[in-house]
Amino acid sequence: MDMEACIHTAAEVIRSRSSLQPQVGLILGSGLGDFCDGLQNAGKIPFSELPAFPQATVEGHCGEFWIGTHQEVPVLALRGRLHYYEGYPQNVLTIPVRVMALLGIKTLILTNAAGGIHPRLSPGSLMLLQDHINQSGSNPLIGSNLGEFGPRFPDMSEVYDAGLRNDVLLAARKEGMDLACGTYLMYSGPSYETPAEIRFFGKIGADAVGMSTVPEAIVARHCGMRILGISCITNMAAGILQKKLSHEEVLETANCIKPKFLRLLDLAVHASVQA
Ligand code: HPA
């Protein structure tokens, strides 16, 4: 099955499983999938039930679409995402974004766990993405352009929607929730960065670093979606503290931030349908 057929078939299967018309899409990062447990009228579709669909392989990422309502808003959430470091080309790992576009989703909330580079960040901080730097070494739009989704050379001057970000910042401020804003840099992984790489990334303008999000954001902009990006800072990046990095620490901190992160998603979903 070619890629376009795989995307269309997945959209048809999801459509056939629920009468909801999802308005907001979410991609949930490492250890951040619990949002799905709070959905009403929820149904889940594991990637394994979608013909020719790529499969998720990482601990803490199960690979399922969840459809349901969140505070009355119909949403489609990806619990567990596909990563470049798993060996998937970026046009493959972003298939779920295009499935969401075919299902009529206009706003996408992208979340991730990230290492903090900027000194104002600390483990437990939440950062809204203002922009990104693609240091992954690839681009999901390489190859023939899928013209039904968007143009050959899409503009990337405002990947993360400023209006939506401001609405979320205002709503968070009203409840006394402290949010940072900054630039996210994608590194391929799966090894963490070296201290020298982190010094370099800080110098070129990165506030946080992670191994995801950028391919999905590029594809979502190609499809004309509005994007809100959220990083959960689970650790300080390599060399900033005298401490080694581990996936266990990332999952542990993600777990501690969970209540604040879930509250932020409430505000973000609400803001997505107000604007
Ligand atoms: N680097 C890359 N990816 C990450 C990190 C990090 O420090 N923390 C969580 N994901």
Image: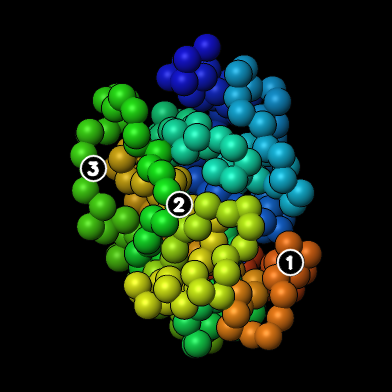
The foreground one among 191 and 58 is 191
Q: Earlier in the sequence, mark 1 or mark 2?
A: 2
Q: Earlier in the sequence, mark 3 or mark 2?
A: 2
Residue ranking furthest to the top: 1
Residue that mark 1 sits on:
246
On residue 136, the disc is 2
Residue that mark 3 sits on:
154
Compared to 216, does 113 lie above or below?
A: below
Any part of residue 25 in sight: yes
The foreground one among 5 and 117 is 117
| 162 sits to left or right of 5 | left
User: Can you give x and y, in whole percent of width and height, for residue 116 in the image?
Assistant: 54, 76
| Residue occupying the point 62% across, 17% down | 51
| Residue occupying the point 64% across, 75% down | 235
| Residue occupying the point 42% across, 48% down | 137
Q: Quadrant of the C terminus?
A: bottom left
Q: Quadrant of residue 185?
A: bottom left
Compared to 119, does 117 lie above or below?
A: above
**Disc 1 element:** loop
Compared to 175, does 156 lie above or below?
A: above
User: Can you give x and y, in whole percent of width and height, for residue 34 in the image?
Assistant: 71, 55
